[in-house]
Amino acid sequence: MALIVLLVIIVVLVLWVAGAYNGLISLKNQVANAWKQIDVQLKRRHDLIPNLVETVKGSMQFERGTLEAVVSARNRAIAVQSTGGAPNVAATAAAETALGGALSRLLAVVEAYPDLKSTGNAAQLQEELTSTENKIAFARQMYNDTATMYNTRQRQFPTVLVAGLAGAAPAELWEITDAAERENVRVDLSLNPPPAPAPTSPATPTAPTAPRS
């Protein structure tokens, strides 16, 4: 009887270890897949920027510094993204934050050039960039949620006892440290001028008062 109880305990223990191990491996793969989704959207963003630069550079001959800043930031972001091995979340976040800032400044300058209204790609670029920025934000949130779940699971008892066996290590979160990055990049190439303020009516002059005798 004691032998049967011991065997049952061993079987239950083995099943639990297998379940905990497989659960950690599953979450680890989900984190990797969530990062790949970010990677896809970042590549899409990088591919759209040259089209934007080509669209506006003819009308922005005196803003070469702004254009070059965007191109330089894009190149740095691509260099970080192309690094082999495990993803460097902090480096990627820093490079993409710099790229987002340069892109925001470019789009702010673009609004000063009404001639770009006639550019056929303006509306398409606006739609594609807006969609891409939204997808990046969604993919980043999904990655952080999955990574947080993975980090929590591997620290919980008794799962922590098999975390080493599963090769589990804390996943780095994509943290936003720049306050400006907390707002989505404003993508507006419509160049519609802001409404003019309503004219103010001139004050009615008051008649002079007669001197008192």
Image: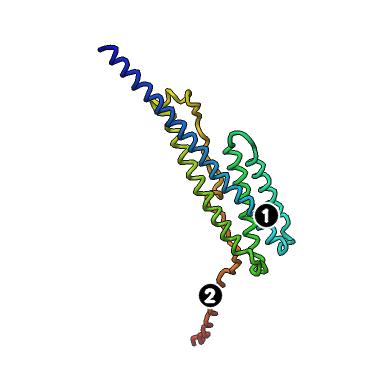
Whether residue 137 is situated above or below residue 202 in the rendered picture: above
Whether residue 172 is situated above or below residue 11 in the rendered picture: below
Place of residue 55 in the rendered image (x, y in percent of width and height, measured from the top left): 68, 61
Q: Residue at x 37, y 24 (%)?
A: 15
Nearer to the camera, 120 or 174: 120
Q: Residue at x 46, y 35 (%)?
A: 27
Q: Decide: marks 2, 1 in contact (CB < 8 A)?
A: no
Q: Amino acid at mark 2?
A: Ala
Is 59 situated left or right of 191 in this image?
right
The kind of secondary structure element at disc 2 is: loop
The kind of secondary structure element at disc 1 is: helix
Q: Residue at x 59, y 36 (%)?
A: 88
Mark closest to the chain's N terminus, 2 or 1: 1
Q: Amino acid at mark 1?
A: Pro
Residue 104, quarter of the rendered image:
bottom right
Nearer to the camera, 15 or 106: 15
- Location of mark 2 (residue): 198
Between label 2 and label 1, give the one nearer the viewer: 1
Name the mark on residue 50.
1
Color theme of the render: rainbow
Nearer to the camera, 149 or 66: 149
Q: Residue at x 72, y 59 (%)?
A: 63
> How far is the residue under mark 2 from the one under mark 1?
40 Å
Place of residue 33 in the rendered image (x, y in percent of width and height, measured from the top left): 51, 40
